[in-house]
């Protein structure tokens, strides 16, 4: 007792010295807590009352966020593409058409409104009928009809646009054009060629015809004021993406496509040191084919219709041939208006070029990652395929459909990737897809055609749905492990993307969006409300979203979805895990209530 009393007495005597320090410590802690609340509060989105559907949503365990609501965009934003907005073109240079590249708005200039459908919008015509016709009111652009109807791109008949299958270089129809191409390239018939890219795609009639022949094509065209080529393609149910070969690489890995095509796409292939053709070389698989129809091919018979001279076109053709040879392309076949070159299937040619110090273009050095393709500048050098890859060339790649489930060689480049993991991933997605179809019977029907897997790994969902009448755009985050080469090696298509920004497509272009833990993985970088606004922009009215997310985020997502005018229900996963939930959502069809209202 004496000891305790002495201790207490000493403490009492020193209390006057300790007190100011204690008060100061309390004040500092309180200030830190307050500032922390301000910081984290800026990066959150709101939770209102979450609708109960399927099962109750417990908001007590969800992120505590502030309230959010979205106004309607004005009707002149019905075709709004945030990162390729013609309203902003004057801010950027015209050299090499750089103004048509991606230029996303800064955070303070982002639209926080819901993009309306055009007046008279109808649910899209269903596949396969949609390949040949679409509703005029869904893509109400008269300019392209007036300018291209004589080339049989499309024609307006009553309430519909009809697609006859014509084009600048195939007046007899796209099928006859592809028939001739197949005669020149037998690999198009036996499953050797599975993936293709069409640069300057028009209304994607070439890609649409190839679908019937088992070839999956990414149709590529820039955003423009009038033609809306990519929007027409997607409205038809044909894979397409906004893009242009200008100063940056296309958002695809190296050695991906089996074939590339340009039908009078007006790309100046031999200008600027041949950088555009070098980009085609980079994304083509070794042994892959580049097909060109239009100037300067068949200049001997066509030059009079090109407003030029035969000498000029002969010179252009010779420049093109020399440039292709310097990149290790060889002329494979040529007939009438079509010429086909093949990329070297091995590195023998590149090794010869490296021995010439004056060779142009030079080989790219090791500092330039071949697959780096998100805002990566074009470089005037040849990307030489890695010598360690022995089975990535077109001849060594299994033919379709065997390649879909064959373990790709490049999975070994993914951290932790191997054949066992690939097979387990395949099995996992077969189980998940089966469960999804129970929860959403529209999958596998003609109600769902255009699908996006927003953060895939190996394209497992697309592979599991391969027998359904749909196609999948497989998106790999530019911040995630580089698995997109594996997707292409399987005979599927996809692109790199950063979901902190808008996707390169028009509004109302996808029937189903799939998310697998995207908000969990990206919540420190991307604000949820902007990601979901983007999902709403690209989702068709009456379209669906399957959101697979941690239980922690599920209720918050459902709350924001309600403000987007979506209806959602909460479901269990196939494993009935308590840590992960499914949200099955549907976007409602609505029309602008105030066509002249300003966006916010």
Image (spheres, rainbow, N blue to C red):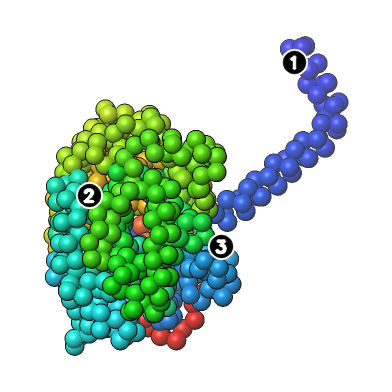
Position above or below: 243 against 187: below
Residue to which mark 3 is pinned: 107
Which is closer to the viewer, label 1 or label 3? Answer: 3
* Distance between mark 1 and mark 3 Cα atoms: 62 Å
Q: Quadrant of residue 335?
A: bottom left
Of the image marks 2 and 3, the number of the one nearer the N terminus: 3
Which is closer to the viewer, label 2 or label 1? Answer: 2
**Residue at 47% across, 51% down:** 374
Q: Residue 526 vs residue 142: left or right?
A: right
Query: Which of 401/536 is in front?
Result: 401
Query: Which of 222/393 is in front?
Result: 393
Q: Quadrant of the N terminus?
A: top right
Which is closer to the viewer, label 2 or label 3? Answer: 2
Q: What numbered label is drawn on residue 194? A: 2
* Distance between mark 2 and mark 1 Cα atoms: 86 Å
- The answer to whether the residues at label 2 and label 3 have Cβ atoms under 8 Å apart is no
**Residue at 27% across, 51% down:** 332
Residue to which mark 1 is pinned: 4
The picture places residue 278, in percent across and down from the top left corner, at 44, 52
| Residue 354 in view | yes
**Residue at 43% across, 59% down:** 319
**Secondary structure state at the residue bearing disc 1:** helix
Position above or below: 404 against 503: above
Q: Residues within 10 Å of mark 2 (few under 14, many from 20)?
A: many
Q: Residues within 10 Å of mark 3 (few under 14, many from 20)?
A: few
**Secondary structure state at the residue bearing disc 3:** helix
Of the image marks 2 and 1, the number of the one nearer the N terminus: 1
Q: In the rendered picture of this protein, how many numbered marks are placed on residues?
A: 3
**Residue at 13% across, 70% down:** 129
The picture places residue 356, in percent across and down from the top left corner, at 51, 39
Query: Which of 361/253 is in front?
Result: 361
């Amino acid at each position: 007792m004496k000891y305790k009393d002495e201790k207490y007495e000493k403490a009492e005597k020193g209390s006057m010295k300790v007190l100011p320090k204690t008060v100061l410590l309390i004040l500092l802690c309180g200030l830190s807590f307050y500032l922390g609340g301000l910081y984290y509060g800026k990066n959150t989105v709101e939770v209102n009352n979450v609708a109960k559907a399927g099962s109750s949503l417990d908001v007590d365990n969800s992120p505590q966020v502030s309230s959010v609501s979205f106004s309607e965009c004005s009707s002149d934003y019905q075709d709004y593409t945030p990162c390729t907005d013609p309203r902003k073109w004057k801010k950027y240079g015209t050299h090499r058409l750089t103004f048509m590249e991606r230029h996303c708005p800064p955070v303070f200039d982002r639209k926080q409104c819901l993009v309306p459908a055009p007046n008279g919008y109808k649910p899209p015509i269903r596949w396969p009928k949609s390949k040949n016709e679409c509703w005029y009111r869904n893509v109400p652009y008269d300019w392209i009809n007036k300018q291209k109807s004589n080339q049989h791109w499309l024609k307006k008949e009553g309430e519909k646009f009809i697609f006859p299958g014509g084009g600048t270089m195939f007046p007899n129809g796209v099928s006859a054009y592809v028939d001739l191409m197949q005669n020149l390239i037998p690999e198009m018939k036996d499953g050797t060629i599975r993936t293709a890219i069409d640069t300057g795609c028009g209304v994607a009639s070439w890609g649409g015809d190839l679908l019937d022949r088992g070839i999956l094509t990414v149709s590529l065209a820039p955003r423009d004021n009038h033609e809306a080529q990519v929007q027409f393609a997607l409205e038809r149910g044909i894979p397409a993406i906004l893009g242009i070969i200008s100063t940056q690489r296309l958002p695809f890995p190296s050695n991906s496509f089996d074939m590339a095509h340009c039908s009078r796409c007006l790309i100046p292939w031999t200008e600027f040191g041949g950088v555009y053709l070098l980009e085609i070389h980079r994304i083509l698989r070794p042994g892959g084919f580049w097909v060109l129809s239009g100037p300067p091919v068949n200049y001997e018979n066509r030059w009079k219709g090109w407003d030029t001279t035969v000498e000029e076109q002969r010179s252009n053709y010779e420049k093109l041939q020399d440039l292709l040879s310097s990149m290790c392309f060889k002329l494979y076949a040529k007939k009438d208006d079509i010429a086909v070159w093949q990329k070297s299937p091995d590195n023998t040619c590149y090794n010869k070029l490296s021995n010439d110090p004056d060779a142009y273009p030079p080989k790219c050095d090791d500092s330039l990652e071949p697959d780096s393709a998100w805002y990566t500048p074009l470089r005037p050098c040849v990307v030489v395929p890695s010598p360690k890859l022995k089975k990535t060339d077109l001849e060594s790649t299994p033919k379709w459909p065997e390649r879909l489930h064959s373990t790709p060689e490049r999975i070994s480049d993914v951290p932790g990737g191997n054949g066992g993991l690939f097979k387990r991933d395949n099995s996992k997605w077969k189980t998940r897809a089966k469960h999804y179809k129970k929860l959403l019977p529209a999958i596998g029907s003609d109600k769902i055609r255009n699908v996006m897997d927003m953060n895939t790994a190996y394209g497992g969902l697309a592979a599991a749905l391969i027998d359904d009448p749909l196609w999948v755009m497989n998106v790999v985050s530019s911040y995630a492990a580089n698995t997109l080469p594996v997707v292409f090696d399987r005979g599927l298509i996809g692109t790199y993307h950063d979901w902190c920004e808008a996707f390169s497509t028009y509004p109302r272009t996808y029937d189903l969006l799939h998310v697998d833990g995207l908000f969990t993985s990206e919540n420190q970088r991307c604000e949820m409300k902007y990601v979901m606004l983007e999902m709403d922009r690209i989702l068709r009215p009456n379209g669906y979203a399957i959101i697979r997310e941690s239980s922690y985020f599920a209720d918050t997502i459902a709350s924001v979805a309600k403000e987007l005018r979506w209806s959602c229900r909460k479901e269990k996963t196939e494993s009935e895990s308590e840590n992960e939930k499914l949200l099955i959502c549907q976007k409602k069809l609505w029309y602008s209530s105030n066509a002249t209202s300003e966006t916010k």
